[in-house]
Image (tube, grey):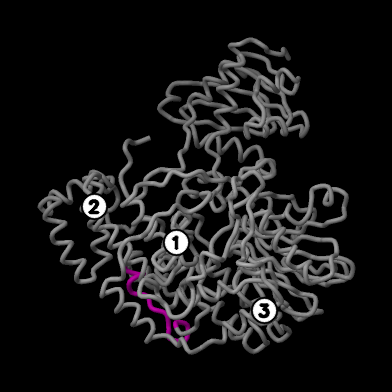
Amino acid sequence: MAQGRSSSLAAALILGLSALGMGMGMGLAQQPAAPPAVALQRDAEPATRAANEAVLRALNFADRADFDSARRGFIAAIPDGTIAGPAGAGGLTAWSMKPYDFLNGEAPATVNPSLWRQAQLNNIHGLFKAADRVYQLRGYDISNMTVVEGDTGLIVIDPLLATETAKAALDLYFAHRPRRPVVAVVYTHSHADHFAGVKGIVTDEEVRAGRVKVIAPDKFMDHAVAENLIAGNAMSRRAWYQFGSMIPPGPRGQVDTGLGRTVARGSFTLIAPTDEIKQDYETRTIDGVEIEFHLTPGTEAPAEMTLYFPQFRVLNMAELTSGTMHNLYTIRGAEVRDARAWSRYIADALERYGDRTDVLIAQHNWPVWGAERAAVFLKKQRDIYKFIHDQSVRLLNHGLTPAEIAETLRMPQSLASEWSVRGYYGTLSHNAKAIYQRYLGWYDANPANLQPLPPVESAKKTIDYMGGAAAVIARARDDFKAGQYRWVASVMNQVVFAEPGNREARELGAAALEQLGYQAEAGTWRNAYLMGAMELRSGIMRRAGGSTVTAEMLGAIPLDLLFDYIAVRLNAEKAEAKRIVINWTFSDTGQTFVLNLENSTLTNRPGRLAPDADCAFTLTRASFDAILLRQKTFPAAIAAGEVTFSGNPMKFGELAAMLDEFSPFFPIVEPRAATP
């Protein structure tokens, strides 16, 4: 192959792979650097006060057993729970509990008292002893890190989301327990808050040298990055709503997510597993500790497993159980989860380990102590997902639509009175709709809904039919006074989409969303409502954020998936009537790919090289990743002999010019300025 050095070639290649490297957001962990100082304005309205007072009367707040469980085994805490961010990040704090000092005493009128209780429980942080040789670091990320003491070293389960929080948590452990090497890391499942802090506790060199095993469930690497890649930009933006990333903490602001406080900010990493659990049940002895692994795929994560420690009579349920109803559908966006399988796997754990468990731990929230309480807990967790599944399917078979099912379905009192299955993270409402989606999809079978008008056009027609914006706002003010916040939020959304500059509609819509947030029992719903209110008032807060697309993460993405991600950025109109074929050869992995553009569609075929390709490139995967991450330019890689080519490289620049960039700041509560 000829080696190109011309200025035209350099321009083509700069345009090419630098364009390919744009817009690679990764969902959960792509969070803004810090919440802005934006105050939410209104106090609780009378209807909100009444709704929250009704919650106080309905639930048994005198039951303090969970607080005893959450504090049991406490050893020590990091002062204020404050952990510094990455070096050179301008004083960024990766984690702090200090902004949540307001979580004392009784719930204010601006917070649902049930959510307030959950937030107080999640505010209990530190190093805890769960059993002899089993410890947990809780409250230093949305997830927990579990440390099991082997005969010579440590087994660390789920090293949090950020290297900074993982290191600080392990340092807290070392301050109170003997300092011994980490000999194994276990990832319970494929979500980033359970693996991305791994390099805060071990290094690549230790793993390559065989001094540290990394154990994960089957197909972990297929899912660890893939779930949030293809739709990563949209998922990242929506995650800001789910986690309240831009909302200042406070009684009128961000309080909790239900599953934990929030998500850490910092450095995200990944070390590939050295050992995967592939059978339904596998028993391994690691540094003298016997562990029975149970695969539970397709539940809370597509690759997940639980762990049982017979020596210690400890059952670790990973994220199959927690101190809240979980998501069958997560409002940041993801595939709907299998409620039937989820319930069945919990039932399996109860049957297999229930009478052999003295303490049940998980990778979120706090433990359940004693075999009797653990069995009751597992039964309620088992039944909540099966109940939602069966009753939602029953109602959809009666012809009810998703909204009707969500309004109709009520939990039995035996479940509704159980704190651990209340909707702090998932909710009965959106989980019921998830069941409908899993079986029947988005369409409710009413032909009027088969092809409705798009939002802006629909809003303009609706507001015109209703007599214009002024008339709608006047009537909505009366509904607001009557506490009909759901309707006011909906109709003001119509006005804003019809007239984006209408400040009255924005403020009234924000006020309605704010009251809905104050009433919400789910931390995720509260965050979403308050984010919507803030953006209606102030617009989208454009602040710098991190991304999980680090070198470690990018290197874990299979090349076919990476090319598929590039394909979803192809602008079909720009590609009209174009045909381009490019061969790729990766000299270090031996992989070959054909990238083919025709019919405004970009496809890739692994293991092939097209004889009629317009151009061909040979390079290493490491060089490809470095260019995508903009650590190196394509011309520099060519000059260094890392990339060679043949054919017409200008075709590559032509293809790259057809790729869209994805902004993480697209509007949600107001219309887009233009269609992409």
In the image, residue 340 lies at what x, y percent?
A: 54, 70
Does 455 sit left or right of 26 as displayed?
left
Q: Is mark 2 on a helix, strand or loop?
A: helix
Q: Nearer the viewer, residue 649 or 58?
A: 58
Packing grade of label 1 (10 A; few <14, some 14-19, many >=20) is: few
- The circle on residue 85 is none
Q: Earlier in the sequence, mark 3 or mark 2?
A: 3
Q: Nearer the viewer, residue 375 or 366?
A: 366
Q: Which amino acid does label 1 sit on?
A: Tyr
Rendering quarter of residue 581 = top right
Does 451 sit left or right of 307 as displayed?
left
Quarter holding the C terminus is top left
The residue range painted magenta reads 404-416
Residue 526 to residue 380: above or below: above
- Which residue bears the numbered disc 1? 439
Q: Which of 623 and 101 is in front in this view?
A: 101
- The circle on residue 360 is 3
Q: What residue type is labelled 3?
A: Leu
- Which residue bears the numbered disc 2? 494
Is residue 183 visible in the rendered structure shown here?
no
Q: Earlier in the sequence, mark 3 or mark 1?
A: 3
Q: Separation of disc 3 and disc 1 at Cα?
A: 33 Å
Q: Which of 674 and 307 is in front in this view?
A: 674
Packing grade of label 3 (10 A; few <14, some 14-19, many >=20) is: many
Disc nearest the viewer among 1 and 2: 2
In the image, residue 169 lies at what x, y percent?
A: 70, 63
Q: Is mark 3 on a helix, strand or loop?
A: strand
In the image, residue 7 lies at what x, y percent?
A: 61, 11
